[in-house]
Image (spheres, grey):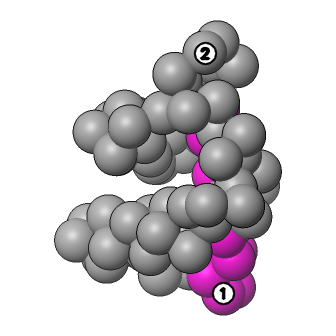
Amino acid sequence: MKIGIAGSLESNDCLVTIKESETLSIKVQSIVDAFYHDQIVAFIESVLADVNHDKVDVTVIDKGALNYTIKARLLTALHRMEVSHA
């Protein structure tokens, strides 16, 4: 199974793990979850749609990352998954 990981658990960052899957699955754990869960999920869905990835399992542990950080981590994790030889 191919897997890609990017980011960290530092403040204002997020740790993104992406695996190949038969369907799209997005799990978000965030320090601002009560306020922004739906917006974070929608943003992740839009980034994945922009790069035509609709069959992945995404797990995001967010420590207050801004959208551009989440996008950078997602794209890096996707790239690492694609070049993974696992």
State whether residue 27 is above or below residue 31. Answer: below
State whether residue 43 is above or below residue 72. Answer: below
Residue at the spot 32% in from the left edge and 64% down from the top edge: 47
Query: Amino acid under label 1?
Result: Thr
| Front position in the image: 28 or 83 | 28
* Mark drawn on residue 23: 1
* Residue 57 position in % (x across, y down): 69, 66
**Mark 1 neighbour class, 10 Å CA radius: few under 14, some 14 to 19, many 20 or more:** few
Assign a secondary structure to mark 1. Answer: loop
| Front position in the image: 42 or 36 | 36
* Residue 77 position in % (x across, y down): 50, 39
Q: Main secondary structure of the magenta part?
A: strand
Q: Earlier in the sequence, mark 1 or mark 2?
A: 2
Residue at the spot 72% in from the left edge and 61% down from the top edge: 34
Residues drawn in magenta = 14-26
Q: Is residue 21 one of those drawn in magenta?
A: yes
Residue at the spot 22% in from the left edge and 71% down from the top edge: 50
* Residue 12 position in % (x across, y down): 51, 22
Query: Amino acid under label 2?
Result: Ser
What is the CA distance from the residue labelled 1 to the residue labelled 2? 31 Å
* Residue 18 position in % (x across, y down): 63, 52
Of all residues shown, which one is farthest toward the front?
35
**Can you identify the residue that label 2 sits on?**
11
* Mark drawn on residue 50: none
Q: Are marks 1 and 2 in contact (CB under 8 Å)?
A: no
State whether residue 2 is above or below residue 40. Answer: above
Q: Is residue 48 visible?
A: no
Q: Is residue 29 left or right of residue 83?
A: right
Quadrant housing the C terminus: top right
Q: Is residue 6 left or right of residue 42?
A: right
Q: Is residue 67 visible?
A: yes
